[in-house]
Amino acid sequence: MDSLTRSDLAELIDVEGEWCVSLYMPAVRAGAEVQQNTIRFRNLLRRAEESLQAVQMRVPDVERLLGPATALLDDAGFWREQGDGLAVFVGQGHLSTFRLPLRFDEIVVVNRRFYVKPLLPLFSGDGQFFVLALSQDQVRLLEGTRDSVAEVELPDVPTSMAEALQLDRPERQVRARAIGETGAAVFHGHGGPEETAKPDLLRYFQLVDRGLRDYLADKRVPLVLAGVDYLLPIYREANSYSHLLEQGIIGNPDMVSARELHQRAWEIVRPVFAAEQAEQIALYYELDGRGDVRASHTLTDIVRAAFEGRVATLFVPHSVQKWGVYRAHSHKVHVHPSQQPGDYDLIDLAAAQTVAHGGTVYVLEPEKVPGGELIAAIFRY
């Protein structure tokens, strides 16, 4: 499975060309139904071909543009490692693929920009969280959303305390720890765990934190620790990630499946997400109620503000499109009643630009957008 970073998203947002093809589909990770993945993707490519031909692109040019994506059909390794959803972006000289822990509807969009709104729940206020499962014998990082979880490969993170500290002297290994079936540590010597093992544990966790730093560098999502009770406060001393939650999952995570860790972590992060979203909705109503210009539900104003980096929080409906054009040179927004040649989904543009400028996007059911409007925003100024 792949990671989608804010810099990846920014690169997609910056691409603008004659034709950009965005393909989304749900994927099957394992079992007999995995063969449906390539069948579904072939059907998406066929729809993309039809859309490109409808805008008068010649068949050889269509085949040339979609060639890199078509070649994926024969890449067995690519299809063996799937997430819950697949997103593929094809442009002139451009191919990006993301196998993600997010289930997509089947979508084909042919436009002069890539269509990124289905990706935004991974960057929204309630879309993504991590679980760091720690023991002295194993380190696992799980990436979760409300409905899915997947393990993240961590090539720069030590897989155990022994590896991290290169414990090659038997007497030091005995002094450091011995693990029983329950996952509790048995310490030898005159002192307790804090006296005999804490320096080694702290150094181990400092190396884990350092290995995670690049991966988590641009993330702003909750991190939940899972481990036996005496390990978690030691890790907190080593931690440098600012979104680590106070509440953790207590117990030996080596004995717990990724699915169960996900379920227990979701119970921790769900109220955090709900409180943050409720706080932002309340702030919108407070600003709007007193006529503060920082609250807006006007699409044209919000699109302009998003491109200017002024949107702090944006509320958008997940399944609604509003077509039009944004003229960067004049900062003018033209909204059309139906899609016209050269149009973009203005809601998608506003959401993408908000995330690109460090804002928060909440992708909601249409009826939950504050004020019952098509779109709503809180401006920074």
Image (tube, helix red, strand yellow):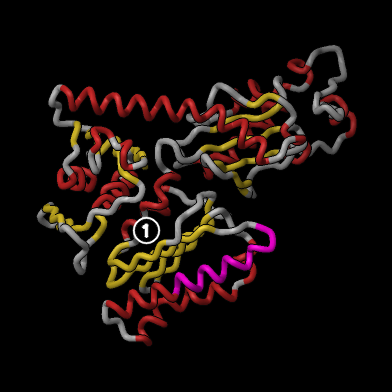
Magenta span: 30-45
The kind of residue on which mark 1 rests is Leu
**Above or below: residue 148 compared with residue 88:** above
- Magenta run includes residue 171: no
Quarter occupied by residue 72: bottom right
**185 and 334: which one is in front?**
334
- Magenta run includes residue 44: yes
**Above or below: residue 336 compared with residue 373:** below
**27 left or right of 121 in image:** right
Q: Residue at x 15, y 58 (%)?
A: 336
**Residue 348 position within the rendered picture, expressed as x and y whole percent measured from the top left:** 30, 52
**Disc 1 target residue:** 12
**339 left or right of 2 in image:** left
**Residue 166 position within the rendered picture, expressed as x and y whole percent measured from the top left:** 78, 39
Q: Main secondary structure of the magenta part?
A: helix
Q: Quadrant of the N terminus?
A: bottom right
Q: Residue at x 15, y 55 (%)?
A: 335
Q: Residue at x 65, y 35 (%)?
A: 261
Q: How many marks?
A: 1
Q: Residue at x 61, y 34 (%)?
A: 263
Quarter occupied by residue 224: top right
Quarter occupied by residue 292: top left
Residue at disc 1, secondary structure = helix
Badge 1 density bin: few <14, some 14–19, many ≥20, Cα 10 Å = some
